[in-house]
Amino acid sequence: MGFPTANLRVSKEKILPPGVFAVQVTLPDGKRRRGLCNVGVRPTVAQPLPQCRVEVHLLGFSGNLLGKTLGIEFLRRIRSERKFPSLKALSCQIRLDEKAAQGRGNGVKTL
């Protein structure tokens, strides 16, 4: 869909309730970047995941993080996870979520 993500392995006791969160990510080199984190089953995709997952989209980042350890700081909850009528509608929402994660959008909920 054009939003590269890092899929994380997280123990069950550390998983937050499903939703989209603004996060601060610490990369392996110590640099920090803003991002979006989806906790859930991705209900809009053709086959939703059978179990809850944690997926992070780093804003403005390109590179390969496969096998790397990232530090994730949850800043605030943006919205609940929900099913969209199409991938295009989901993409539009992700653009709004990116603005909210950067503090430029409306409707941001505090954790």
Image (tube, rainbow, N blue to C red):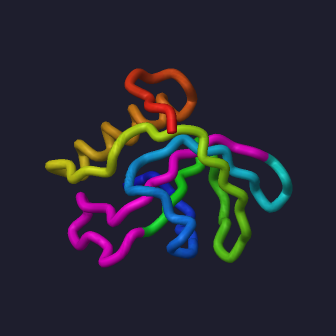
Image location of residue 24, percent across then percent down? 66, 44
Q: Residue furthest left?
A: 85
Which of the 4 image quarters holds residue 70? bottom right
Image location of residue 52, percent across then percent down? 39, 69
9 up-or-down from 23: above or below: below
Residue 48: say if magenta. yes
80 up-or-down from 44: above or below: above
65 up-or-down from 71: above or below: below
Q: Residue at x 39, y 32 (%)?
A: 96
97 up-or-down from 30: above or below: above
Which of the 4 image quarters holds residue 75? top right
Q: Residue at x 32, y 73 (%)?
A: 49
Q: Is residue 3 left or right of residue 69?
A: left
Residue 63: say if magenta. no
Image location of residue 67, percent across then percent down? 68, 76
Q: Is residue 72 left or right of residue 103?
A: right
The segment highlighted magenta reads 32-52
Q: Quadrant of the N terminus?
A: bottom left
Q: Is residue 53 left or right of residue 46?
A: right
Image location of residue 78, percent across then percent down? 43, 37
Q: Residue furthest right?
A: 29
